[in-house]
Image: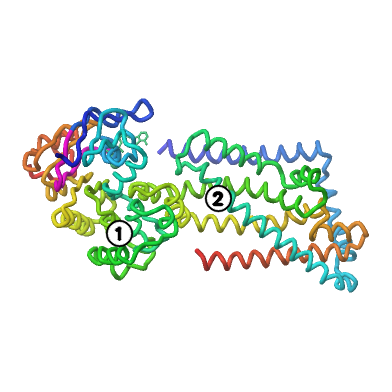
Amino acid sequence: MEQTMDIFKRRKMTYTAVFLVFIAVFAGASYVADFRVVDGILSFPAAISWIASNLIPDQAALERLPNILDKLLETALVSVAVTVVAAIFAFFFSLLGSNITKIHFAVKRIVRIIAAFFRNVPDVVWAMLLMFSFGQNILTGFFALFFTTFGLLTRAFIETVDEVSSDCVEALEATGANLIQMVFQGIIPSSLPGIITWVLYMIETNIRSSTLIGVLTATGIGYLFDLYYKRLDFASASLVVLSIVVLVLVIETISNKLREVIL
Amino acid sequence: MALLEFQHVSKIYDNVTRALEDVTFTVEEGEFVSIIGPSGAGKSTLLRCINRLVDASSGKIIFDGQDVTSCSKKELREIRTKTAMIFQHYNLVDRLSVVENVLHGRLGQKSTLSGVAGHYTEKEKEEAFRIIQEMGLIDQAYKRCDELSGGQKQRVGIARAIMQHPKLILCDEPIASLDPKSSKVIMDHLKEINENKKITCLVNLHQVDVAMKYSGRIIGVTAGRIVYDGPTEGLTKEMIHEIYQSNENDLITDVAG
Ligand SMILES: Nc1ncnc2c1ncn2[C@@H]1O[C@H](COP(=O)(O)OP(=O)(O)OP(=O)(O)O)[C@@H](O)[C@H]1O
Ligand SMILES: [Mg+2]
């Protein structure tokens, strides 16, 4: 009895301590970064009125809509294409890194390191690096997204595969099936829901990222945003942003529906 | 010649855990043998050494005239087609249908390509449905396995094993997750296969009474060693207590003795 009271008391103290540390870190960081909380909050009304007067799309902006939609479609298609291609590569690569296929522990290690490398370099940095080789080109954006997506999905698929299919793979192994048969009859069917969820999520993420990369590489919807922004045509720029938000919402709805149907 | 022969088999995990020590026994074709013993005694390890889901550390295992411990990869797959396995947790591909899971029993005997594509001959499909019928699952044949009860899943497991046309079925605690009624159905099926199809059965069991009821021979394993190997009738109350390292009234099973 005494011991259980002790556990509760200790937990309460831990929470209090964490909370205090959190406040202290925030205060310290604000001081160091010279961030004034009160000033920040006070500037909200002015920011909102600026947004209201400048960022509401006007007639001129709406005339650019067809052009915007055209670039938006291009961006969306590239994102989908990148994600699907990266997913296929990542799946087969992740098999080498999973515990189930038991190829060799060194192979497993190397695969995990490569995947970590690709996903820990941010896509924007990839884009800047690739710009040297491809220039301001749609390929630059494509490969920048491909690398991060590939790294992230490899890692995600390794976990999905390991978690989901070890039992049934063991059973297939016991029937005398070979590795390729185990992959197609055991691993793929059992990990498909996880794989699809990850791919849909990455498509959403990549549409957002491709906007930013487009600013750098002067392609797609990011290019249009950059153009309007630099012309100080904020109304059109905000229409671009709104259209991206709508697109992401649409994609999210579609992917939720898709998940319901498939899973 | 014996169907299965263990010669001084030992298994040490990670250089420390001695799971099997100097295990020697033989199993003749057509036998129904139960392996009993306390948790961690090495029963699962023993079974898994036979189809090399686990590699024995030393000793020899001869199955059907072939040395399992030193065969090539190709020979191993061939041996595996002849030794089906049934698992405590069924180990089905849950998202596939019953009939697809049953057909998986043929994978080891198919070409890579037709295995990948899931292409089976009409004859194989007919046989799968016949076995499903025998298992009393015909109404579930097209259902996904995650919609089945535990007892039904285990019957799919048995069907998959029969589909392999094995000489030996290895059952690792086939009824440990089932209620008494489903357990009886499963054990009756195994017995039936053993008697009618003449398939040898090697079954790990936690229930001593079940082992005594169904099998002609019992192997008792304690701490990686065989402490009893003989006919069911010879298994005395004292022997059971020795296998489980227990005293009077320590066991949940009421051993009639
Ligand atoms: N993969 C493994 N790695 C390391 N040690 C293992 C492994 N598998 C089993 N062991 C150890 O080997 C010993 C025998 O295990 P085994 O699973 O064969 O026992 P068991 O008789 O089947 O037990 P249970 O009745 O609980 O299933 C145990 O001490 C266990 O901890
Ligand atoms: Mg076990």
Residue B198's tag is: none
Identify which residue, A174 or A243, lies in the foreground: A174
Which residue appears at 66% of the width and 42% of the height? Answer: A118
Q: How far apart, in angstroms, are the residues tagged by discs 2 and 1?
A: 29 Å
Residue B39 higher or lower than A219, as above or below: above
Q: Quadrant of ligand 2?
A: top left
Asked if residue B86 is positioned above or below residue B22 in the image, the reply reads below
Instruction: Indicate left or right for B146 with B65 as reference.
Output: right
Which chain does the numbered disc 2 sit on? A
Secondary structure at badge 2 equals: helix
Q: Which residue is mark 2?
A: A91
Q: Position of residue B189 (x, y in %)?
A: 19, 57
Q: Residue at x 75, y 52 (%)?
A: A139
Q: Is mark 2 within 8 Å of ligand 1?
A: no
Q: Is residue B98 magenta?
A: no
Marks 2 and 1 share the same chain:
no
Horizontal and vertical percent position of residue B146? 39, 61
* Residue B156, numbered label: 1
Q: Is residue A124 left or right of residue B142?
A: right
Q: Position of residue A185 (x, y in %)?
A: 42, 55
Q: Residue at x 54, y 55 (%)?
A: A195
Q: Nearer the viewer, residue B80 or A149?
A: B80
Q: Quadrant of the N terminus of chain A?
A: top left
| Amino acid type, callout 2 | Phe
User: In this picture, which residue range is highlighted in magenta?
Assistant: B25-39
Amino acid under disc 1:
Val
- Answer with left or right where residue A86 lies relative to residue B142: right
